[in-house]
Image (cartoon, rainbow, N blue to C red):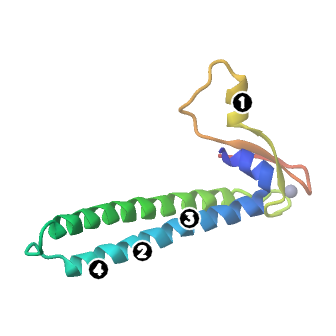
Amino acid sequence: MEPAESIVRLGFSRWYERQLIESHAYLVTGFLCLIVVLASLEDFSLRGPGYQPLAMLMLIIVAGLVCCISCRRYLTILAYAEHIAEMSTCEKCRAYAAFSVTGSSAARQALSVEADQGANAWFAVRCRKCGHEWTIS
Ligand SMILES: [Zn+2]
C-alpha cells in the first residue's frame, strides 16, 4: 500500500508508529538469525554423523540470508520513515505532523493513461493549522 493511502487511513502518527514497529520486527528477526548462525557455526563439524554436516551448513546459509535480508529491510523501512518524518514539519508555522494528504502520485497514475511507473512516489499535503501546502517525496 502506498504511504499516502496509509497516512490518509491511519493518520501520520499511527503510520509512523507502525513503520517503526515493522522495521524493528525485522531488526529482531535479523538478530535472532545471527544468533542461529553463530550457534550453528560453533557446533558445526564436517565429521558429524550422516547428513548432519549438510543440514547444519544449510541452516547456516538460510539463517545468514534471512539475517541479511532482515537487516536490509530494517534499514530501508527506518530510513524511509525518518525521511517522511523530516518532511512533515510545516515550513510556515513549524507544526509537526499536522497535515492532511490532498493528492498523491499513485492517485494521479490511476487517473492517467500514460502512467509513469518509474517515477518516485510523492504526495501533496496541506497544513491543518495554517493551510500551507507542500509536497513530500
Ligand atoms: Zn502550517
Amino acid beneath label 3 = Ser
Image quarter where ligand 1 lies: bottom right
Q: Which residue sits at x=28%, y=66%?
A: 59
Residue 136 appears left or right of 28: right
Badge 2, how many Cα within 10 Å: few under 14, some, many 20+? some
Residue denoted by label 1? 108
* 56 or 17, nearer to the observer: 56
Of the numbered discs 3 and 1, the one sitting upstream in the chain is: 3
Residue denoted by label 4? 39
Residue denoted by label 2? 32
Q: Relative to 95, is 121 above or below?
A: above
Residue 17 appears left or right of 80: right
**Quadrant of the drawing holding the N terminus:** top right
| CA gap, disc 2 and disc 1 | 41 Å
Q: Which of marks 2 and 3 is in front?
A: 2
Residue denoted by label 3? 23
Of the numbered discs 2 and 3, the one sitting upstream in the chain is: 3
Q: Residue 35: name its quadrant.
A: bottom left
